[in-house]
Image: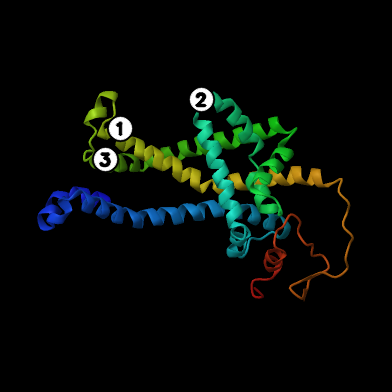
Amino acid sequence: MTYWFTQNYQDLTIRYPALKEMSTMLITSIALVIPGLLIFVKAFWDYLVAYGALNSMTEGYLNTGRVYDFRAHNDVILKKTFSFIALWFIIGIFSIIAIIPVFWIFAFIFFIYFILVFQVFTFENGLSPVGYFKRSFELIKGKFARTCLLMGVLGIFTYYLLPAGLSVIFDYLNLTNLLSKAFEAWAFTLPLEPVEQFGVTPAVVGSNIVKQLVFFLMIGFTLPLRSICWSLWYNNFAESVEKPKKIRKKTTKKTVKGKKLPENFKIEKRGIDPEIIRRARLEDDEY
């Protein structure tokens, strides 16, 4: 909408002289930006919630062999919305600090130690946003090298090899050339004259947009793979830490919301809603 507005601005000012005023033009531009911004914010929020919910889905699948009731898994995250936002806020602060070159090495080290914060957030209750980071640090402590190796394997596979493979498919189907030409035509409308001396031409802009499009498509669709791997990694470390704890007394009858459950049913640990597990174990016609 903003692109259409800028392309037709001269004609619009003829029909609506008020648009010549700077205040009117700015208000109109902001009004045109808001709908797209809201769509982006909603989509990005759903993406962040999905990253946490995938951990719950992984745990549910490991216990039942099926994944049901996606809304219930999302609710595991949404029930702690304030802590979730605070968690991302702290990560944002760390990311801003990590941009400074002098902190790159420290940022990398802390990134490894804090890599399980979302798994801790999903599976463990009663912690503060800062507590999630402390708990992740405790879990990774002594396993830094192994965690770093896993992150390297996941990074190479999902951030390099798979995007490169998708690029080959785009080239084979001639999609790269078609999209590059389309974005190049759009780039001709941009004021690139001051930066063309640095090699920033419409053709370069078009080809780079396509590369970024392919990259982010693959990064987005491999999110479940990374989330599952880190959930399994968390389970390995959390179980080893929990072993010394006192074994809970066995009970002969288990109920969820007043309903008797099968004898082989086990209430899952680390805060996963037992109702999710119960629904997943029902037959399709019962569900």
Image vertical order of residue 268 relative to residue 3, above or below: below
Q: Secondary structure at mark 1?
A: helix
Residue 171 visible in the snapshot:
no
Image vertical order of residue 1 relative to residue 136, above or below: below
Residue 109 visible in the snapshot:
yes
Q: x%, y% of residue 84? A: 59, 52
Q: x%, y% of residue 250? A: 89, 62
Question: Marks 2/1: CA distance?
Answer: 27 Å
What's under tag 3, amino acid-wise? Lys
Labels 2 and 3 touching (C-beta < 8 A): no
What's under tag 1, amino acid-wise? Val
What's under tag 2, amino acid-wise? Pro
What mark, if any, has residue 204 been given in the picture? 1
Q: Residue at left 36%, top 43%?
A: 173
Instruction: Out of 101 and 216, give the one closest to the viewer.
Output: 101
Relative horizontal placement of residue 252, taking residue 64 as reference (left or right): right
Labels 3 and 1 touching (C-beta < 8 A): no
Q: Secondary structure at mark 2?
A: helix
Circle 2 packing at 10 Å, graded few (<14), some (14-19), many (20+), is few
Circle 1 packing at 10 Å, graded few (<14), some (14-19), many (20+), is some
Question: Marks 3/1: CA distance?
Answer: 10 Å
Q: x%, y% of residue 153? A: 60, 34
Q: Quadrant of the image for the C terminus? A: bottom right
Q: Secondary structure at mark 3?
A: helix
Labels 2 and 1 touching (C-beta < 8 A): no
Q: Quadrant of the image for the N terminus? A: bottom left
First of labels 3, 1 by sequence position: 3
Determine which residue is flagged by label 3.
181
What mark, if any, has residue 101 been given in the picture? 2
Between marks 2 and 3 in the image, the one whose residue lies nearer the viewer = 2
- Quadrant of the image occupied by residue 27: bottom left
Between marks 3 and 1 in the image, the one whose residue lies nearer the viewer = 1
